[in-house]
Image (cartoon, rainbow, N blue to C red):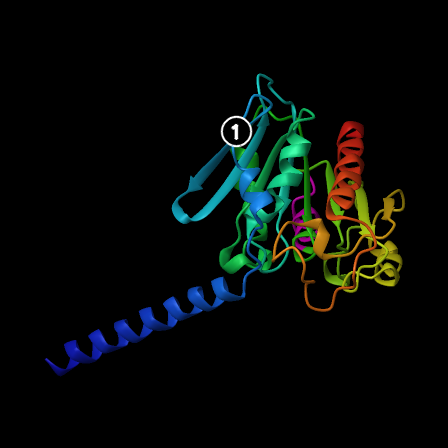
Amino acid sequence: MRKRKLKGVVIVLALTVIGGIFLGTYVLSLQPMPEAIKALTSDDRVTVNRVFVESWLNYYYVFEPAGEKPSRGFIIYPGGLADPRAYAPLARDIAAQGYRTVIVSMPLYLAILGYGRADTVIQAYPEIKKWALGGHSLGGVMACRYAKKFREKIDGVVLWAAYPSDRFRIDDTTIKVVSIYGTEDGLATPDKIEASKVHLPHNTLFVRVDGGNHTQFGWYGDGEGLQKGDGPAAITRERQQAITVEATVDFLQRL
């Protein structure tokens, strides 16, 4: 009887700890702005669906150009602690130009815990002939990690305010890469982007967003505050996003 009670206490404590971790992560996470939520609605240009994989904790959002059958796809890994919905406006604008665009959710909002989740998306859409994998901040780092390990599965990497660590360097691959960064970024600073060149293929394309910062690559927060450590932007979020979409689509067209 005592063993059963002890086992019950252990289970309750474990569930409490797990619940606390999830609640704490949610509280700390970067929640989507109203503009991001609005971008999740289908219309006559783009259809949007949420697809669950195995459980409600593993899912992705699919943005597709209405009435088209894309042959190229783009997978987005969110930044650290960023709700995947925060990248819906970007995904929507990219999809509207003819690409199946997918935002992948991550365990505890951390791509480092689910960097292999692109596999599920790639397997789900065999009709896509070319795939690019990208991400913002930590999501971009983990995109490089995936590219390093599964270089045969993707054709390009898109980095938004991100760069690979020495451990996940991909300079020895033939994968095409574009690195899009802001001049006012206080996290992925221009100096860090410059230093990252040795870890990327020699033909990597670098796109500088004058006046852009780290926070404005997504739609999260209250719209006024900055992500901790970031610098204030000198352009609007809308302008920074438009430049990012244009550079990303231009890259996808070249794959």
User: For this rendering, which residue is in front, 7 or 98?
Assistant: 98
Residue corresponding to mark 1: 42
Q: Is residue 118 visible?
A: no
Task: Tell whether 225 sits left or right of 83.
Answer: right
The percent coordinates of residue 106 (x first, y second) are: 53, 53
Q: Nearer the viewer, residue 248 or 140?
A: 248
Highlighted magenta segment, given as a residue range? 142-152
Q: Which residue type does callout 1 highlight?
A: Ser
Magenta-span inclusion, residue 151: yes
Residue at the far left: name it. 1
Quick one: quadrant of the N terminus? bottom left
Q: What residue lies at 84% left-to-right and 57% top-to-bottom?
A: 193
Looking at the image, which residue sits at the far bottom?
Answer: 2
Compared to residue 21, the image places residue 92 above or below, namely: above
Q: Is residue 134 above or below residue 7?
A: above
Q: Residues within 10 Å of mark 1 (few under 14, many from 20)?
A: some
Residue 204: give x, y in percent of width and height: 86, 44
Which residue is located at x 70 percent, y 26 percent?
A: 97
Residue 117 seen: yes
Does residue 230 sit above or below 115 in this rendering?
Answer: below
Residue beneath the point at 57% across and 35% down: 122
Q: Secondary structure at mark 1?
A: loop
Quadrant of the image occupied by residue 165: bottom right
Percent coordinates x, y for residue 124 in the rendering? 51, 32
The overriding secondary structure of the stretch rendered in magenta is: helix
Q: Is residue 42 above or below residue 192?
A: above
Instruction: Where is residue 175? Give x, y as percent.
Output: 77, 40
Image-based side of 9 in relation to 85, left or right? left
Question: Quadrant location of residue 114?
Answer: bottom right
Q: Nearer the viewer, residue 220 or 3?
A: 220
Residue 208, magenta (yes or no): no
Please report the residue visible at 83 percent of the width from the left and 54 percent of the height from the top.
234
